[in-house]
Image: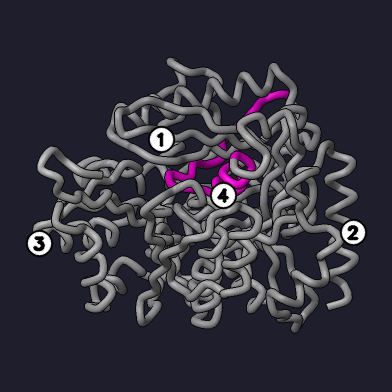
Amino acid sequence: MKNDSNEVIKSEQAVYIFNMAEDVWPFISAMSNIVEQRAEVDVCANLADRDLFSNVDENNLTIITPRKIDDDFLQYVSQITGKKKWNILVPNKHSGEICLDIIQDRNLFKQLVDLSNGAKKLTLTSYAVSPQFFQLINELKNYGIEVYTPEAPTEESAWCVNFFGSKSGIRQLAQKSAALEPDLMMADGLICVQSLDASRIAAQKYVKEAGVVLKTNKGHTGMGVLIFRPGDLPGDYQNCQKAILNILKQNEYWDKFPIIVESLVNVNQAVGGGTPSVEFKIQKSGRIEFLYYCGMRMLPNGTFLGVEINEDIINDRIGARIIDTGFFIAEQYASLGYRGYFDVDMVAAKNGEIYVSESNVRRTGGTHVYQMANSLIGKDFFTDSHILSNNAYELKAGARPSFKQVLDLLSPLLFNKKTKEGVVIASANLLSQSAFAYVVFASNKKKANEIENKMFELLESL
């Protein structure tokens, strides 16, 4: 672009940072088992390459990831999406706090400064809004750079990220809003502190109701959630309390954060698999944008795997209800200054109620699926395609295939741009942890299940 004096003006540069681990850094850093802690940091780092699919429509974009992207995977993403030019930077070390790693890697930080060009302006987005993210912004400002953050609140309003993204915060919002929005309900529960009190409250509830759920304030990938069903614990109070306390004492984080003790909900699997979710984006202007609803694919222990997206997975009446509840929550977030992506996770009960379980105030485990669907299927993906995703399908023990191996193995099932059906491999780096991330697109649910099952059969040969 040129101005009237024929001076060349460079386009403003945008930078996206994949900082998943920072979203739950207090939780990760409080994990007692060092091996599990390192594995959690590695999972967060290895999922970075799936976000390439979230950024295929962005020009002048630099992506900063905690781990190098596999060259073959980069070529694969380019072939599917048509995006040929990538600018990817990686800090020289990965601590789990990537924004601090960027600051400490002075060569990489200088590249960021240089990207701002003569205009001294940068657009900065990230997976999550974290305290470390604001440290990076402030460091850039020290170099005279104006930083625009279209998907983040101001630093003064950033408290709402951690507050509403916590189990206790969303519960307080539900309690406060009961009169204004009766549909914003949560399972009966209490917020307490320390393992001893939690074990006593949980044991009483378990003996009385034959089930109980305990949640740390902000866990990750299923950790920090304990679900006890009938027969899992002793039926008498004293032994039940001791059993729960022994489990809580295995990880320090139970004593470092508030603990939520909830009733176990009798789940109705017919409604979005029993765990529907709805995602929104609040624009910088404050405008609220509904993105999609889905059914979450969960393991029995509460671990999130992926999503199922199609208009038919939830009937119109319940779909309207969860969207309305989500909009109400979005209005509260927006009024308090939050900007960016968030979801509201729910549980469908057999008594006909829909209970809110938590809110992830960041990009989510389904955001990249939504963005991929927009890119590969089109804006009508919600009706035109049946979508299944999994961020953590476990391969056979010890199997750590290369991306090229998996690509060749699944070649008969890979996504076809003409038919708009097939498997999209969502990550290469995750294979190093014997896990496989994918998204299946098909014209209907039956076909989607057939493709997924055939894929499972092929993966068994690894």
Residue tagged 2: 454
Secondary structure found at label 4: helix
Name the residue type under label 2: Lys
Answer left or right for 312 relative to 89.
Answer: right
Q: Amino acid at mark 3?
A: Asn
Question: How many residues crowd mark 4 within 10 Å: few (<14), some (14–19), many (20+)?
Answer: some
Pointer 3 residue: 142
Cα separation, mark 4 vs mark 2, equals 23 Å
Q: Is residue 232 in sight in this rendering?
A: yes
Residue furthest toward the front? Answer: 6
> Considering only vertical position in the picture, is 117 above or below 287?
below
Identified by mark 1, the residue type is Gln
Q: Position of residue 428 (x, y in %)?
A: 63, 70
Callout 1 crowding tier (Cα within 10 Å): few <14, some 14–19, many ≥20: few
Earlier in the chain: of badge 3 and badge 4, it is: 3
Pointer 4 residue: 368
In front of the other: 165 or 206: 165
Residue in front for this viewpoint, 457 or 197: 457
Mark 1 — residue? 172
Quarter holding the N terminus?
top left
Q: Which residues are magenta?
A: 352-374
